[in-house]
Amino acid sequence: PVPLVIDTDTAQDDCVALLVGLLDPEADLRAITMVAGNVGFDRQVRNAFLTLSVAGRLGEVPIHLGCRRPMVRPWESAENVHGDGAGGLTMDESGLSAESEHAVDTLIRLAAENPGELSVVAIGPLTNIAMAAVKDPDFAKNVKALYIMGGSNNGRGNITAAAEFNFYVDPEAAKTVFAAGFEITVVPWDPLTLRYAVFGQSRLDELAALGTPLSDFFIRVCAATLEFDRSVGIDGTTHPDSLTAALLLHRELITSSDRYNVDVETAGELTRGYSAMSWGVHGLEPNAVVVERVDSEGFFSYLKKLLSTPTVPS
Ligand code: BDR
Ligand code: CA
C-alpha cells in the first residue's frame, strides 16, 4: 500500500477523499492534516471525525490541526457552497480529540522518517504544505509525490472568473508550493473536474441504491453542494478531491496528462489565485504534471465499489 497523508479542509468531497484513503486497500493513510478552507475550522475537524466514524476507523488514523488561516491573507470560506460540509450530520464528540502535534510538523516528520516514500494528497488551500516547505528545506525532496487539487487549465475559475477556490484562498501558499521542487501532479477544476467528475441524478440514484452506511453518508454530505451546483448550472455533484486521492492510488485512471509549468497569480486585481498553466510553448521549465483527461466511468465504478464496502460505524 501507498503511505500517504491527506491534507484537507473537510467538507463534502473532502469527506469522500478521506473515505478513499481510509478504505482503499492500496492506501496506507498515516495521518489527516487539517487546513483552513471550506467551512469553519472546528466544523471541518468534526467532519473529519465523522468520516472516520462512518468508515469504522475512529481512533486508528490521527487527525492533526494545521494552519487556521492563509499565509498572509484573512481566511475566506465557501460556506455558501458547502453549508456545514456534512449535510447536518452530527455525532457524539465526547472523548474525541485531535493530536497535539501541529499538522505542519507532522507533515515534515512523516516525510523525513522515510525520505522518498510518503505521498501527500492536498485537497484544500496549500497553506500547510507551503509552511512545511518553508520550515524544512528538505520537505519537498522527502515527499515522494504531491497530488494537488486546484487551479484550472483553461483560465476559468469557480470562486471568481479567473480562480479556483483552493488557489484563491491562499495564492501565496500555492505559488510557494509550485516553486519548492516537489514532484507535483495537479488535478484542475476546469475542464477536468467539470467534464469527468460530476455525478448527475442517475449516478446518484445508483449510489443511493447501494443502501450501505457509506452510500447514505455520501448522499447526505453531497446534498448541500448538489443544490448549489444546480443553482449555478452544474447538473450533479462535483468530485475533484476524491478524484485526486483515487488518481494517486490508481494512475491507470489517468488517460491523458502532460508536463506544464504552473504558477499562481498573487498580485492581480481580478486574477488573484489564477493558475497560469504553460504547456511548453513559452520556454518555461515544467514543474508539474497536469491531468487532462481521466476514465470517468472507471472513476465512478471505483467510488461505487468503495461505497459498497460493508462498514460498522465506530
Ligand atoms: C475545491 O474547493 C473546495 O470547495 C472543494 O473541497 C475542492 O477542494 C474545488 O474548487
Ligand atoms: Ca477541498
Image (cartoon, rainbow, N blue to C red):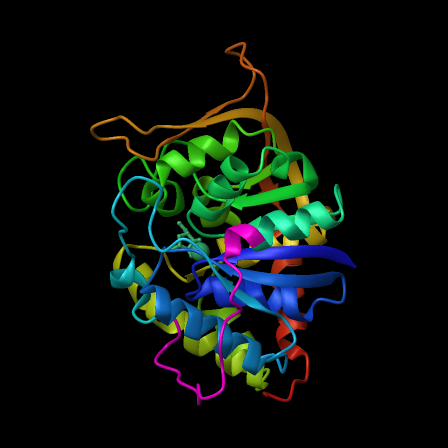
Q: Quick check: is 135 in the magenta stretch?
A: no
The image shows residue 101 at horizontal and vertical percentages of: 53, 61
In this view, the residue farthest toward the right is 1
In this view, the residue farthest toward the top is 283
Identify the image quadrant of residue 234.
bottom left
Quadrant where the N terminus sits is bottom right
Identify the image quadrant of residue 313.
bottom right
Looking at the rendering, the stretch of residues picked out in magenta corresponds to 85-105
What residue is at 43 percent from the left and 69 percent from the top?
A: 45
What residue is at 56 percent from the left and 85 percent from the top?
A: 213
Compared to 53, does 182 lie above or below? above
The image shows residue 109 at horizontal and vertical percentages of: 64, 51
Identify the image quadrant of residue 212.
bottom right
Question: Does the rendering let one see residue 95?
Answer: yes
In this view, the residue farthest toward the left is 269
Q: Is residue 200 left or right of residue 212?
A: left
The image shows residue 227 at horizontal and vertical percentages of: 31, 67
- Main SS class of the magenta portion in the image: loop
Question: Does the rendering let one see residue 226?
Answer: no
Q: Is residue 85 left or right of residue 302?
A: left
The image shows residue 81 at horizontal and vertical percentages of: 30, 61
Q: Nearer the viewer, residue 55 or 228?
A: 55
What residue is at 56 percent from the left and 82 percent from the top?
A: 54
Compared to 40, does 293 lie above or below? above
Q: Quick check: is 93 in the magenta stretch?
A: yes
